[in-house]
Image (cartoon, rainbow, N blue to C red):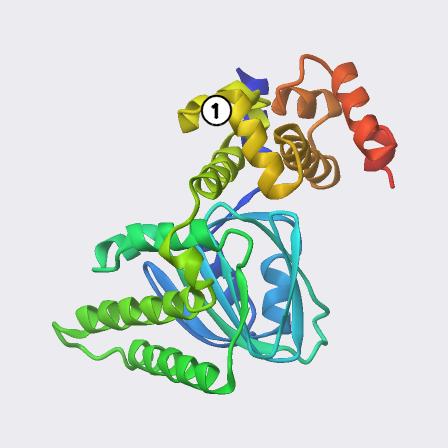
Amino acid sequence: MERQESQENQTIPSLSLKDIILRAKQISNSGDHHYQQGYLVGHFNAEYHSMLTHNPLRLDAIMFVLCTKGSVKFTCNMQEYEVHAGSLLLLPPRSIIESHIDVNTQYEGYAMVFDGDYLGKCNFNIGKFTALMLQIVEQFQITLTETEQQRLIQSITMLDQTIAEQVDSPFREDLIRSMIETLMYHICELFSLRIKPEESKKMSRQESYFREFMLELNQHYTERQGVTFYAEKLCISPRYLTTIVRRISGLTVTDWMNRYLIMEAKYLLKYSEMSIQEIAYRLSFPDQSFFGKYFKQHMGISPSQYRNQ
């Protein structure tokens, strides 16, 4: 039981809205930002982003990053994005994120972080947002026109100023929720306008299955489930799932499972205090020897060699 609790507590740590707010408080010159229960909105600099995701973290919130000066590199689910001036980046819930930025970089931008439960309290249509995320699963970064950027900054600034006023009014929280809802729809529209017309009319059934597979994989990859497990989740045959994934991504189902599993293994080896045997159990390998062979097959070196690099 103790070993099982240790394994569950030592994986890629989550980054909740509460964590983000606490980190913002720790940096006096991180930028001008305001937060309440359920959301954080504001202007940030390089120091904040450097501290925010210095190591890989699993995002337990919805985050948008708008860069207005300089650039910052984000890794989201093993895909690297370089966010430059005019770029808008969406980081979905459960994404594994990491930023790569020097604290001295002349970076400036806006960050908007929302708790999923809070959005549920608004009138925001979560169903439409989820459908949009399925369509843009590989297009989480867009470049705005100058006009689009200025309009979005105006919306963010107005929301930020309204939060900062702290007016004692029975309508204030309703006003803020309404503004957040409007801002979310504004951002969703900016992303939806980048989707090709034929894609916005109808996503192919195969693309839908692939996106659903990726969402399921993101939740279950440490269990080392086989193709049949994911096929059953999608209510299709294993053979059909294998065909779809290869056709759309160029990779097999096993390739994707290995990518996610190796990512987790590398993190645990570098940043956790778990023994290699504990990591093997955490990732559902029968023993340390089996895990060692698997890791060396994919990385070319043993887990202990990788840890000691």
**In the rendered view, does 276 fall on the left or right side of 160?**
right
Q: Is residue 12 visible?
A: no
Q: Is residue 309 above or below residue 1?
A: below
Give the amino acid type for the residue marked by disc 1 in the picture: Ala
- Residue 244, percent from left and from top: 55, 34
Question: Is the residue marked by circle 1 packed among few (<14), some (14-19), or many (20+) residues within 10 Å?
Answer: some
Q: Which residue of the protein is positioned furthest toward the front in this rendering? A: 198
In front: 59, or 195? 195
Residue 99 screen position, x and y as percent: 65, 60
Residue topped by disc 1 = 231
Picture layout, residue 37 above or below residue 12: below
> Residue, x 44% and y 56% (percent of image)?
199
Residue 104 left/right relative to 165: right
Residue at 58% in and 42% down: 248
Q: Tell me which residue sits at (47%, 39%) in the image.
A: 206
167 up-or-down from 240: above or below: below
Q: Is residue 159 visible?
A: yes
Total labels: the figure holds 1
Residue 18 locus on image (x, y percent): 43, 55
Write down the quadrant of residue 308 in the picture.
top right
Left/right of residue 271 with respect to residue 115 in the rendered view: right
Viewer-nearest residue: 155 or 118: 155
On the image, which quarter does residue 12 sit in?
Answer: top right
Task: Please provide percent x and percent y for residue 165.
Answer: 28, 82
Residue drawn 53% across the image and 34% down it: 217
68 and 50: which one is in front? Answer: 68
Q: Quadrant of the C terminus?
A: top right
**Depicted 194 relative to depicted 17: above or below:** below
